[in-house]
Image (cartoon, rainbow, N blue to C red):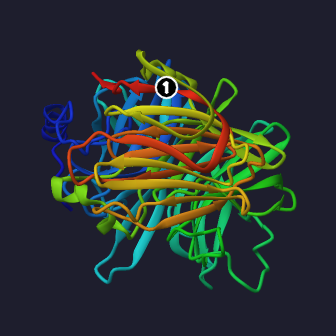
Amino acid sequence: MEKFDKKEIDAKVREGMPFAHRWHNRFHIEMPFGLINDPNGLCYYNGEYHIFFQWNPLGTVHKNKCWGHTATRDFVNYAMPTLAMHPTDEHDKDGCYSGCGLSENGNLRVFYTCNAKDEQGVRTAAQRFGTYMIKEGAIRKDEIAVPHNPPGFTAHFRDPYVFYRNGQKYFVLGAQTEKERGCVLVYREKEGKWELLGELKTKTTDSEKKFGYMWECPALLKFGEYDVLMFCPQGIEAHDYKYQNEYQSGYFAGHASFDSMELYHGRFQELDCGFDFYAPQVFAHEGRHILLGWMGMPDHDADYPTAEKGWLFSLTMPRVLTLRQGHIFSKPAKELKALRMEESAVDIDAQETQTVSASLGEGAEILLDIAMGKAHNIELSLNYGLEKTVIRYERSEQLLTIDRTGMKLGGRGVRRVKLFADKLLSLHIFVDRTAIEMFMQHGEEAASFFVFPEKNILPEMSLSADAPMESVSGRIWELDAINFR
């Protein structure tokens, strides 16, 4: 086991704030050094939103998995990130893997997967509770709830998520059968212990074709009368305009029965169609389902040149989810409006035009409603000198394309998604120094992706069409940075 000096690591984080390098983002959570990935332990407790996340403070590779922590009341001002948990014993010596958070009996509790391997490399995955100690800024490791994977399932058995139904406490867990089929297991608390109810059966359970060889990061959410199983299936082949990333993040919407252990659901739908989105976690507070995701993609570290500078990846901005007609819509949390510098606001109001352009600052929010009129092909370009990233909409194909082939550094490529916009195309885009998040048609689709401009050039936005657009209206704001205190 590596040595982790919390005092030294926390001091190094403080020294690294505020960020100096031009690729460090201003309103996305990231660390001055090391590799972050999955958001963990999301919980509202004692008046604050607590955000834990996977973190390797010792390097930019996927090992030495610890938990970092920050907290916020408003998603604008945050506590200085600290090291909250690291490998310490025979249960988690090879990594403190992902898990959830919950407020329970006056305490902030976490529930995570311990990863340990023996001398032969055989993995043991145990599920363990812990308690976040506010004064110490660290997680006290408590009881092991599930010591190992059950018969019939491999040690790819991780990422617990606690939920309640009818006053009863449950958790779901990502798993893999011995036949290498991804699935979700359900446990229920009974008399202070946890009993395995079995696999939550879906339409994929008895299918001849597996829907992925592993399901990670599951969560069972309640939207009114509907249940939503969110998870990350690994090993799905790309089809036309779906499943274009290495690994997917999405959901089934329907109704869950714990008597029959079945989920009656519709088709699998992706949460984000960008290049860089994985392992989302959701927590509920005051009627809102708030999502944070990892901006990154497993097994594609070469796409992110910040590793050469000593850090990797970001978390997404907080998104609020709603379910309408079986489809999740996502919008940026309303608190993020506080980042707008109103004095910088530029109103867009153009009639019968084929072009609109604007300069953007170090961070920008773009809100556009495009009445397409006679135009059939719309192109919005983010120009960094001679480099550019292009967002295209083809009306005849009902197709939106994100094209990064005009960038020199980092991941490039093209992503395409079907998007219905008969007359009006609505775009809501957040442009950070490298992280970009886009919401289309009022949150019907979302896309998260990175760009890494070679030169220190602020972007220019240009909008063009193949024929006059009836109107282009909206607003552009320069955005302030989030504050770590």
The correct choice, above or below, for 38 with respect to 291 in the image is: below
The correct choice, above or below, for 121 with respect to 348 in the image is: below
Q: Residues within 10 Å of mark 1 (few under 14, many from 20)?
A: some
Residue 143 in view here: no
Name the one closer to the observer, 441 or 75.
441
Residue 159 x %, y % = 52, 56
The correct choice, above or below, for 341 with respect to 380 in the image is: above
Secondary structure, mark 1, is helix
Q: Answer left or right for 229 relative to 459.
A: right
Name the one closer to the observer, 30 or 475.
475
Extreme-top residue of the structure: 343
Q: Answer left or right for 375 relative to 30.
A: right
Residue 281 x %, y % = 55, 46
Res. 359 image quadrant = top left
Amino acid at dot 1: Leu
Residue 435 in view here: yes
The N terminus: image quadrant: bottom left
Q: What is the count of numbered marks?
A: 1
Name the one closer to the observer, 84 or 42.
42
Residue 422 x %, y % = 78, 48
Residue pictured at 56% horizontal, 29% vertical: 333
Q: Answer left or right for 463 relative to 435.
A: right
Residue 443 x %, y % = 66, 41
The C terminus: image quadrant: top left
Residue pictured at 76% horizontal, 44% vertical: 423
Residue pictured at 67% horizontal, 75% vertical: 211
**What residue is disc 1 on?**
336
Residue pictured at 31% horizontal, 48% vertical: 384
The correct choice, above or below, for 101 with respect to 230 in the image is: above
